[in-house]
Structures are given as C-alpha cells and as structure tokens.
Image (cartoon, rainbow, N blue to C red):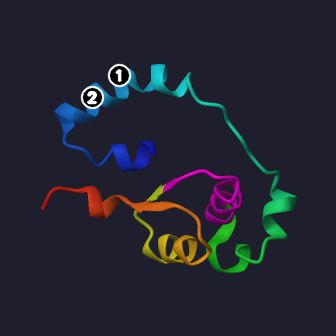
Amino acid sequence: VSNLLGQLPQKIRVDVFTCLPEMVALFDESYFDSQQVTSSPLFPKFGLTDAAIALLAKEKHTVLTVDLPLYSRLLGEGIHAINFNHLRKK
C-alpha cells in the first residue's frame, strides 16, 4: 500500500503518510511463513510476495494492486481484488 500511496501527488502524499500510522494501528496483521508460500502453486509464476497476498486474500481479504496479471488471477479464483489503476482519475 505504501508503494501505491507513494505515487500520489506530493501534497496529498505527505498528508496520507502523516495519518497512515494511526490507520495501520487499527489493522490486524496476518501472514504465512515462506515455506507455506513457496508450496503454493502460484509461487513459481508470481513470486513470494504476490503468492502470499493471494493466500491471505483467500481468507476473505480484498487485494488492492496495480499488477494486472495478479489482479486477473485473483478475480479468476473468486478473490475480491481492486485494480488501483481503475481508481485513478483520468
């Protein structure tokens, strides 16, 4: 998320990053260890981070991404995903 937020215009980005610690404090964090993730069939194609995201998303999380192949795969598996590029103002 921070990488995506880093693409915001400077004035907005500073405001968002200022309040981000308060928002993060509200979240519960979940994770899989690397051995579990590398056992996923998604690992060879998508790598460690994206395969972990897909595993976590199966637990009913929404994924926000700009990665079109990952976005398409998640939708194909019935996982709720949002393509950040669809949210940008044109």
Along the horizontal axis of the image, is 68 left or right of 31?
A: left
Give the vertical position of 87 relative to 79 (above or below).
above
Q: Main secondary structure of the magenta part?
A: helix
Q: Which mark is residue 80?
A: none
Magenta span includes 19: no
The spot of residue 8 in percent (x, y) is 25, 44
Q: Amino acid at mark 1?
A: Thr
Task: State the residue lying farthest toward the left.
Answer: 90
Location of the N terminus by quadrant is top left
Magenta span includes 56: yes
Q: Which residue is mark 1?
A: 18
67, 10: nearer the viewer: 67
Magenta part of the protein: which range? 49-63
Give the vertical position of 15 relative to 36 (above or below).
above
Location of the C terminus by quadrant is bottom left
The spot of residue 67 in percent (x, y) is 45, 68
Q: Which residue is mark 2?
A: 14
The spot of residue 39 in percent (x, y) is 85, 70
Residue at 59%, 30% (x, y): give it.
27
* Disc 2 to disc 1: CB gap under 8 Å: yes
The spot of residue 23 in percent (x, y) is 47, 25
53, 35: nearer the viewer: 53
